[in-house]
Image (cartoon, rainbow, N blue to C red):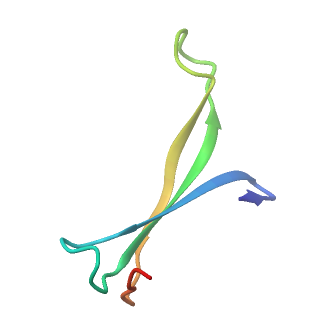
Amino acid sequence: MRYPQGVRLITAEKVGEDLTDAQPVKLQRYVLQESHDDPGVPLYTWHEEKSVITTQSYEVY
């Protein structure tokens, strides 16, 4: 997603043992960061900015 502050990657992952049951979902937001500090390290990397677990449960359709 594009935000005025930059590009973000958002992932969603069900939390629990049986993923076919209704379960909460963990949402994670990553920010693309540029690094010039270390030679041999990729210029851009994703860093987790925020993580939340939903209070509502969701099913697989």
Give the residue at the far front of this rendering.
61
Residue at image location 63% in from the left, 23% down from the top: 43
Side of 15 where 1 appears, left or right: right
Could you tell me residue 53's position as x and y percent?
38, 75
Could you tell me residue 9's position as x and y percent?
60, 54
Q: Quadrant of residue 52?
A: bottom left
Q: Is residue 44 above or below residue 48?
A: above
Q: Quadrant of residue 18?
A: bottom left
Split into 4 quadrants, where in the image is the N terminus?
A: bottom right
Q: In which quarter of the image is residue 46?
A: top right
Side of 39 where 20 appears, left or right: left
Choose between 28 and 13: the one closer to the eye: 13
Q: Is residue 35 above or below residue 8?
A: above
Side of 38 where 6 appears, left or right: right
Residue at image location 39% in from the left, 75% down from the top: 25
Residue at image location 28% in from the left, 73% down from the top: 19
Split into 4 quadrants, where in the image is the C terminus?
A: bottom left
Give the residue at the far left of this rendering.
17
Could you tell me residue 51's position as x and y percent?
44, 64
Give the residue at the far top of this rendering.
39
Q: Is residue 25 above or below residue 36?
A: below
Q: In this view, does 20 lie above or below 38?
A: below
Give the residue at the far bottom of this rendering.
56
